Amino acid sequence: MLVVSPHPDDETLAVGGLLHDLVAAGWRVRLASVTDGEAAYPAASGLGAVRRRELASALDRLGIADATVVHRLELPDGHVAQCQAALEALPHAPRGAVMGPGLVAHMTAIRITRHAPAAAAVVAAAAAADAPVEPEGE
């Protein structure tokens, strides 16, 4: 399964239980983390590193760390919209390394929050699944 997550923690909050159950059933997970979430609290220095450690801890607590490969896209949090080419390359360049056969889960938070990184992740995940999605207007 490929999970495209705007920031570390989005995958855990949105599909953590599903990932746990799929891994228990023998699935492997590929997680494409679009940003490190470093801009969530601008005054906090080193936040990206903290969130990467939290992601590793969450995967461990879910019991899926050994069955999960994390691919950090390292796009700048808060500026994902300017990195559209990198997102468009997601389903093509890493298809063999990231996807493999399986399902694609994507965060649909944009439908609720209109959050730009979430919108970009939804579009990238839909492209990876070959399922066109029209992002909702701003």
Image: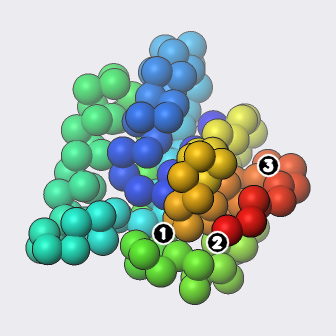
Horizontal side of 116 relative to 11 (left or right) equals: right
Q: Position of residue 86 (x, y in %)?
A: 62, 78
Q: In percent of the image, x 49 and y 57: which residue is there?
A: 6
Rendered-image quadrant of the N terminus: top right
Viewer-nearest residue: 115 or 27: 115
Mark positioned earlier in the residue sequence (2 or 1) = 1
Residue type, label 2: Leu
Viewer-nearest residue: 92 or 119: 119
**Where, by quadrant of the figure, is residue 82 drawn?**
bottom right
Q: Are marks 2 and 1 in contact (CB under 8 Å)?
A: yes
Q: Which residue is mark 3?
A: 129
**SS of the residue at dot 3?**
loop
Horizontal side of 105 relative to 115 (left or right) equals: right
**Where, by quadrant of the figure, is residue 9 drawn?**
top left
Q: In percent of the image, x 56 and y 13: which residue is there?
A: 25
Horizontal side of 81 relative to 62 (left or right) equals: right
Residue type, label 1: Leu
User: How many angstroms separate mark 3 from mark 2 (CA)?
Assistant: 13 Å
Residue type, label 3: Ala
Q: Is residue 118 above or below residue 55?
A: below
Instruction: State the count of labels.
Output: 3
Q: Which residue is mark 1?
A: 73
